[in-house]
Image (cartoon, rainbow, N blue to C red):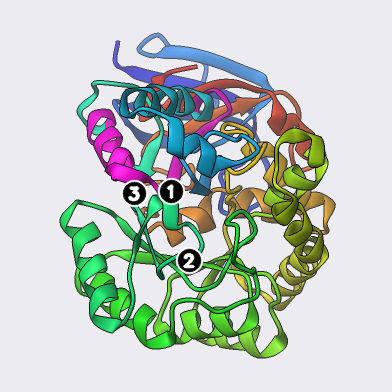
Amino acid sequence: MNKKYIKAGNLIDGTGNSIMQNKGIIIDGDTIVEIEDIRADLNEYDVYDYLDKTVMPGIMNCHVHLTMEPVGNPKVYYDNVSDVELVVNTIKQLDAYLDSGVTYIRSLGCPKYVDVQLKNLIDKGSIDGPGIVTSGPVICMTGGHGYYFGIESDGVDECRKSARTVLKNGVDCVKIMATGGVTTDGVEPGSPQLTLEEMKAAVDEAIKAGKITATHAQGRTGIKNAVLAGITSIEHGVYLDDEIIDLMLERGTYLVPTVAAPYFILNAGKESGITEATLRKCEVVAIPHKESFLKAYKKGIKIAVGSDAGTSYNEHGKTYYEMKLMSDYGMDNMDVIVAATKTASELLKIDKNYGTLEKGKKADVIVVNGNPIEDIDVLADVLAVFKLGKKVR
């Protein structure tokens, strides 16, 4: 039998609509063909009974560093890991995402196009894994944030060529670095790096190729420049002010807040191998980071979930912590779930097929014990995962 029938005691469809009770999801191959009141005669189906559980769309994480190990100093890891070990470790991360109910990720900063190659293997069915929106290496200024997993580019022409290079290598998203950051020594988070003109050159190439863009941005000038350049999403978004938020609303720019990133660094502390410079910078940005997220949420900015997984002590497969922090900081639980499903799929431009549980959508489905609208903590324990209709966990 190819058709599956999922009995859902509680159903969250990801659209933001109220939770529904006692629904049946009919899956034919990889596609949802009907959602209905549960029927009695189910002889023609493989039946999965979750009448005492909650069924919802697979979670999406829109900001991960797929090849990065969450150690104290990621640069040291990259400097010492072999190509073979890098790939083996990364395949383990794919399993961690599926195990935790994450069925789609966006890889934002990946050396040697490992994400592109793994996506191709997943799409061919050679290995299991979440869907991947790829970016390959980031585009940054010489010595800028992320230079050790990026393409250093100075001036408009070099940035344009770098964008064309990553696009030639098959990426789905072009990532550029608008400001300094916390984890790169010698740069400061609030400091602008690539100029408006440099970013616009890269963004224009992505637009011509029909691809989305993202930028690491942790300072007012850099964020504003990126929005003016036409960026699809602001990552981190520290030091947002009303002017920038209004500009983002006008341009339809998304925010991926990654509030878990500073949380895990500060929680690990100085005995963990994290550099003193990283800890110092993180202490400076942590509160403005939280405040910027809340301000953007209250003003109606489109927010998608992304955890910055792979940064120091920010483990792959722990997307739940990002969602919990967003809830703890004041975001409504249903809004958090929509940010991890519907809005995330819209950001990634895959909403035609993914992001919600509706007739005609691909069957990326997870099951949890309890009601995450009432208690977001239930997302920490995912009981079952269906990827493209196949039960993989």
Q: Distance between the residues labelled 1 and 2?
A: 22 Å
Residue 320's spot in the image, x, y percent?
Answer: 67, 38
| Of labels 1 and 2, the one closer to you | 2
- What segment is highlighted magenta in the picture? 98-122
Instruction: Using the rendered view, name the quadrant where residue 49 is placed.
Output: top right
Residue 12's spot in the image, x, y percent?
Answer: 62, 41
- Residue at image x 36%, y 30%? 388
Residue 370's spot in the image, x, y percent?
Answer: 76, 27
Q: What secondary structure is marked by label 2?
A: loop
Q: Distance between the residues labelled 3 and 2?
A: 21 Å
- Mark on residue 144? 2
Q: What secondary structure is marked by label 3?
A: loop
Q: What secondary structure is marked by label 1?
A: strand
- Mark on residue 134? 3
> First in sequence: mark 3 or mark 2?
3
- In the rendered image, is residue 210 in sight? no
- The answer to whether 126 appears left or right of 363 in the picture is left
Report the front residue among 22 and 292: 292
Residue at the left extreme of this rendering:
168
- Please tell me how crowded label 3 is: few (under 14), some (14-19), or many (20+) other residues with Cα within 10 Å: many
| Of labels 3 and 2, the one closer to you | 2
